Image: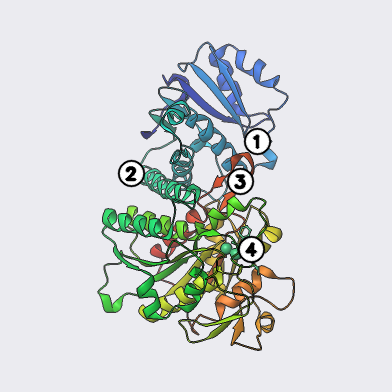
Amino acid sequence: MNSTIRVQSFETLTVTTLAIALFADNDPLVAQLDQHTGGRFGRLWNEEPERDKVGRLFRYAGLPGLACDRLWVVSLGEQSRFTPSRWAKAAQSVAAAFAEGPTGAAAHTLALVAVEGLTDADKLRLLGRWFREATYRYDATLSKSTKENSGKRGCDPLIHLVERDSADLAAALAAGEAVGESVLLARRLGDLPANLCTPEFLAKTAQELAEQHHLHATILNKKAIEKLGMEALLAVAAGAKHPPRFILLEYHGSGAPKEERRPIALVGKGITFDTGGICLKPSAQLDEMKYDMCGAAAVLGVIDAAARLSLPIDLVAAIPATENMPSGEATRPGDVVTTLSGKTVEILNTDAEGRLILCDALTYVQREYRLSAIVDIATLTGAIVIALGKEATGLMGNNDTLIAELQQAGERAHDRAWPLPLWEEYQDLLKSRFADLANIASERGAGSITGAAFLSRFIEPGIPWAHLDIAGTAWKGGDQKGATGRPIPLLVEWLRQRAGSTSSP
Ligand code: BES
Ligand code: ZN
Ligand code: MN
């Protein structure tokens, strides 16, 4: 898909499809359309009973007086109830319809809509991303004939109509498309089944990214992980046939000499399949546990986007990757391991495995780098789905500034996160008689917080750290089943803001 920005009046555009965004009530564009169509459009539009449904598409063909073959109208709902989220919904609806493939050139007017808090560049950045994301199609494991019959054609070229063109707008559009591309990478990885998306496959993907963008990659195999003493990661890997990997990628964008670099660490949970281990999960929807590596996929997506955008920052991506399988060699409930930090952990529940692989990765990055901040991204708890559903990522951490930055970035990127408290009192729940701490809480309740509380025990004092629990947002169930690529947009927006400011939390 080849997309451009153009300043032109929509009536004169010779495209096959023109999508116009309209408010349900008294939109002045209706009069403008009526002038060209001799009143035909207004009569049709005013008869549409569902024209106040945000994101609904109405398709018209053969209207006189317009240069386009087909006119599509997307509803923005009622003017008085308009919000940036409603604009997003309308834009994504047009993007989805365009991806389904009207042939030839297509144009839309979504960038012309005034949206509170968004500059023209902000709008183009979002539109670039959504139109790219909408072209996603999973075909990795479809046979050739199936692949050929199910296809998204996508329109070509795609024209974003604006009031005034500028180099900034073109750059914003390209940046949005680049982030969209990174989101697609994460979605492909998330959707790939666990017999193919193994720890080794994640490592290979990281290596390919490193080659593509000249990143520095380090892949530790099982032997190297043993030598380091990451017993918590190894405890989760104990029952698996596919051996674990510890994956590191470095992106140097700041240009600073090595001694002066203060990178941000992104740590992603890479459980390629979570059976629960000996604490076996029930079988309903168990296939969805292939998505338990979406934190890892997001981390790869963010570093990919940072490199595509040449962000002037330094990043370290760290991914502990393993399956969590039951077997005669698997870790038992009650087993105690010594983590890389030296702290001992009693593994009371083998299904609370995310925190075990993450704690060793967190220790590793703090030892090896002088970090300015750490963000971990994990499908950590089912409890976050109960708390926040599929709308918001759970956000916790040890630094209010960092938490506020991430929340605001999520808002701006339409990829929202919402904070939960992480008070010291919650730590009492992780006490163990047989180790320094247990991997699950001694009581029911606050499951997402106690997961974060466990991780916080592996953060050195003074380092700003945040934890994003994406168990609810990283994928969708139902007939739209699939990975979402969240929270890549949030994180890229956060990094963009950090790159543009000197203050750090
Ligand atoms: N990968 C799961 C979390 C999860 C659950 C993600 C549902 C997506 C949907 C995680 O490893 C897990 O099993 N967590 C347990 C923790 C519990 C044993 C303390 C959970 O949420 O039940
Ligand atoms: Zn898990
Ligand atoms: Mn689990």
Q: Secondary structure at mark 2?
A: helix
The three-letter code of the residue at mark 3 reads Ser
| Badge number at residue 85 | 3
Viewer-side label of 4, 2: 4
Residue 13 falls in image quadrant: top left
Seen in the image, is 177 located left or right of residue 35? left
**Which circle's residue, 3 or 4, is located before the other in the chain?**
3
**Which circle's residue, 1 or 2, is located before the other in the chain?**
1
Gap between marks 4 and 2, in whole Å? 55 Å
Gap between marks 1 and 3, in whole Å? 10 Å
Q: Where is residue 262 shown, x and y percent of the image? A: 36, 75
| Label 2 CA crowd tier, 10 Å (few <14, some 14–19, many 20+) | few
Circle 4 residue:
280
| Badge number at residue 54 | 1
Circle 2 residue:
167
Q: Secondary structure at mark 3?
A: helix
Q: Where is residue 120 shown, x and y percent of the image? A: 46, 44
The three-letter code of the residue at mark 2 reads Ala
Residue at (58, 26) in percent of width and height: 73
